């Protein structure tokens, strides 16, 4: 790693301190995916039930894991957290314990012209203050499916088996794709 | 004819009145300038949207290429079961994140939403736009044509090919 002159570290520290004090999102070390418009971004915001925040229909506990969640930033911006650390899984499980509270997260902010999304990769633990991987969806699935391969959970999930049995892999009963 | 004393009193009242107006105006300007910006509550817009039910993550990020149709149906089911929000890719090219379908009060891996993946639908609903996202609360599925975007012959099954 190239060493920066001490003046640069001072400037960087000053910038980070200003960013912390002003609530400006900071660039952190989230894993980049090479997605267009992505930016590795650490955010601090309040965990909210998106439907509640928008429409005023608010069940207890942000819907207890059954509602899509978002981050409401101090400046009033609302970002939907659509993806968590498990492949093909969302971020609700990683944030639901923080419903209504402020939380610090690290991940990718994707400000695509079509839609702004947040992909949570790490969550700062309330208890320890340490970063924890956003992998709660996978942990929960594994607890409910002991002995199965979490890496390919989508191949062995009973709910998916049922849907594929009824509608096929293409979504049309009886239609089969034959690989060439 | 008005006496000199009365004229003085009237002038004094006018001066007080002007002073009060000045103070009120100054206070209003002060509070407007120091008060935090209040985000106006956005009222929903009644809309009708026709389009395909898609997986929000794969479509917007393009990590699976053009994530729609029969080619991407299986992946869209995985993601919906995994709790990633479902959207409608409108014929207008917009992506509408679905937060409610009719009387369903949940939107994470909700069976009603999962079971219409890749369907072409026409829905009535309430649209909320905020910070770069179009959120749709579907009040009625007016038409459901099922899966009509047959693109698997061109792309195979995405990802993994089976």
Image: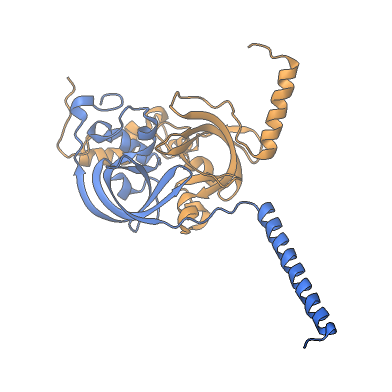
Question: Residue farthest to the right?
Answer: B5
* Number of marks: 0
Question: Residue farthest to the left?
Answer: A174
Question: Residue farthest to the front?
Answer: B1
Indicate the quadrant where residue B125 lies: bottom left
Q: Dividing the image into 4 quarters, which one contains the N terminus of chain A?
A: top right
User: Depth check: A69 or A75 in front?
Assistant: A75
User: Depth check: B129 or A50 in front?
Assistant: B129
Work out whether A18 lies above or below B29.
above
Colour in which the image shows chain A: orange
Give residue A112's position: percent from left, percent from top.
Answer: 43, 34
Colour in which the image shows chain B: blue
Q: How is the image coloured?
A: by chain
Residue shown at 51% from the left, 29% from the top? A39
Question: Residue farthest to the top?
Answer: A2
Work out whether A163 lies above or below B39.
above
User: Depth check: A178 or A50 in front?
Assistant: A50
Any part of residue B21 in sight: yes
Work out whether A40 lies above or below A45.
above
Give residue A31's position: percent from left, percent from top.
Answer: 51, 25
Any part of residue B116 in sight: no
Would you say B81 lies left or right of A171 here? right
């Amino acid at each position: 790693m190239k060493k920066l002159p001490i003046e640069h570290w001072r400037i960087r520290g000053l910038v980070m301190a200003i960013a912390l004090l002003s609530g400006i999102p900071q660039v952190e070390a989230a894993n980049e995916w090479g997605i267009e418009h992505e930016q590795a971004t650490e955010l601090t915001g309040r965990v909210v039930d998106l439907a509640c925040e928008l429409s005023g229909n608010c069940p207890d506990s942000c819907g207890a894991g059954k509602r899509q969640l978002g981050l409401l930033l101090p400046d009033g911006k609302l970002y939907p957290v659509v993806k968590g650390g498990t492949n093909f899984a969302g971020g609700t499980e990683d944030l639901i314990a923080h419903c209504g509270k402020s939380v610090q997260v690290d991940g990718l902010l994707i400000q695509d012209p079509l839609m702004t999304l947040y992909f949570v990769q790490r969550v700062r633990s309330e208890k320890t203050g340490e970063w924890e991987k956003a992998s709660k969806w996978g942990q929960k699935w594994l607890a409910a499916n002991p002995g199965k391969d979490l890496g390919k959970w989508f191949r062995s999930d009973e709910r998916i088996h049922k849907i594929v049995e009824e509608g096929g892999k293409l979504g049309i009963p009886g239609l089969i794709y034959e690989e060439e | 004819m008005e006496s000199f004393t009365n004229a003085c009193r009237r002038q004094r009242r006018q001066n007080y009145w002007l002073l009060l107006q000045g103070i009120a105006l100054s206070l209003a300007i002060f509070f407007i300038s120091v008060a935090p910006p209040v985000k106006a509550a956005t009222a929903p817009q009644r809309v009708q949207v026709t389009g395909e039910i898609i997986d929000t993550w794969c479509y917007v990020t393009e990590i699976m290429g053009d994530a729609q149709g029969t080619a991407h149906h299986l992946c869209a089911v995985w993601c919906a079961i995994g709790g990633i929000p479902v959207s409608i890719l409108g014929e207008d090219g917009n992506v509408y994140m679905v937060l409610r379908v009719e009387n369903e009060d949940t939107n994470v891996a909700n069976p009603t939403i999962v079971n219409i993946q890749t369907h072409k639908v026409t829905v009535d609903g309430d649209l909320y736009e905020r910070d770069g996202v179009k959120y749709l609360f579907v009040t009625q599925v007016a038409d459901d044509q099922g899966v009509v975007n047959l693109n698997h012959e061109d792309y195979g099954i995405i990802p993994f090919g089976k």
